[in-house]
Amino acid sequence: MTIDMDLQELQTIWNSPNKELDTSIKINKTLFKEVSIRQVRSNLAEFKFSNLFELVANLIFFVLLTGFFIDNYTLAKFSVPAAFLILLSLSSIIFNGYQLYLYSRIDSRFSIIETQRTIERLKYYERLDTNILMVIIPLFASAFLIVAAKAFINFDLYSLGNVLIQFTAGSIVVAAIIVFFLRKFPNKHLQESISFLKEIKEIEDQ
């Protein structure tokens, strides 16, 4: 069931004369708002679980990297990229946690306008996250490769010389392609929810 179909159903219920409704289940503004917000939360379920998955993955990554850093802290060529990855994973944990906090504020306790602002903020952070990937992907790819090679096969990737530089250059191209598609196909559920709430606000004000 699409969000547009649900809006249509809500409009029908809202505009129905009271005499057509069972007196024991009269629709009021509070119930209407609760149903509408529940639909928005349902529409953003994929966003919620995506952030939960990333949060758990980053927590595991953070623990493993911390162990690697402790084992290699005397070797700057390994400890520096590990420290960068630790900071990156910690930043991601905070970012995912904050987005989940914003998701939790999509609740009928708050006004429709406040909920609209919350989702607009989520949309802004999505754009910001996409733009940052242009820098993060090349740096992450190189640092991760250095750490992974040392951690899993005890290999010093620096010994390959220009190969690491070429890999970093290639990851810039990959980052550009990923960012292009993310900009071209943003999270449609966020925009749908914003449009849905706008129409709900108009109905509510009638």
Image (spheres, rainbow, N blue to C red):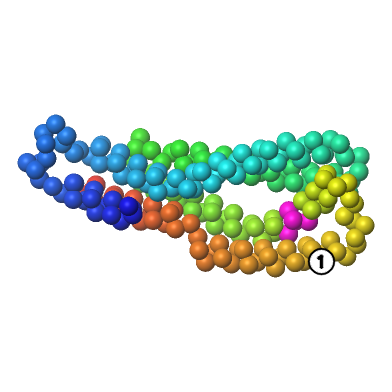
Q: Residue furthest front?
A: 153
- What range of the chain is rendered magenta? 138-142
Give the residue at the far left of this rendering.
19
Relative horizontal placement of residue 156, taking residue 6 as reference (left or right): right
* Disc 1 element: helix
Residue at 27% over, 52% down: 7
| Image quadrant assignment for residue 162 | bottom right
Residue closest to the eye, 156 or 205: 156
What residue is pinned by disc 1? 166
Q: Is residue 54 above or below residue 124?
A: above
Query: Given the image, on which type of amino acid does mark 1 rest?
Result: Gln
Query: In the picture shown, does residue 60 fall above or below 148?
Result: above
Q: Position of residue 54 (x, y in %)?
A: 60, 44
Tell me the chief SS of the magenta region: helix
Horizontal side, residue 129 vs residue 43: left or right? right
Q: Position of residue 79 (x, y in %)?
A: 85, 44
Work out whether residue 100 can be spotted: yes
In the image, taking residue 112 as reference, residue 28 lies left or right, namely left
Say above or below: 104 vs 178: above
User: Residue drawn 88% across and 46% down?
Assistant: 154
Is 98 on the left or on the right of 147, as rendered? left
Answer yes or no: is residue 198 visible: no
Total number of numbered discs in the rendering? 1
**Point 18% across, 39% down: residue:** 27
The x, y position of residue 58, in whole percent, is 66, 42
Q: What is the crowding at mark 1: few (fewer than 14 residues within 10 Å), some, or many (at least 20)?
A: few
Point out residue 194 in the picture as x, y percentages from the top left corner: 38, 53
What's the residue at 38%, 52% (across, down)? 193
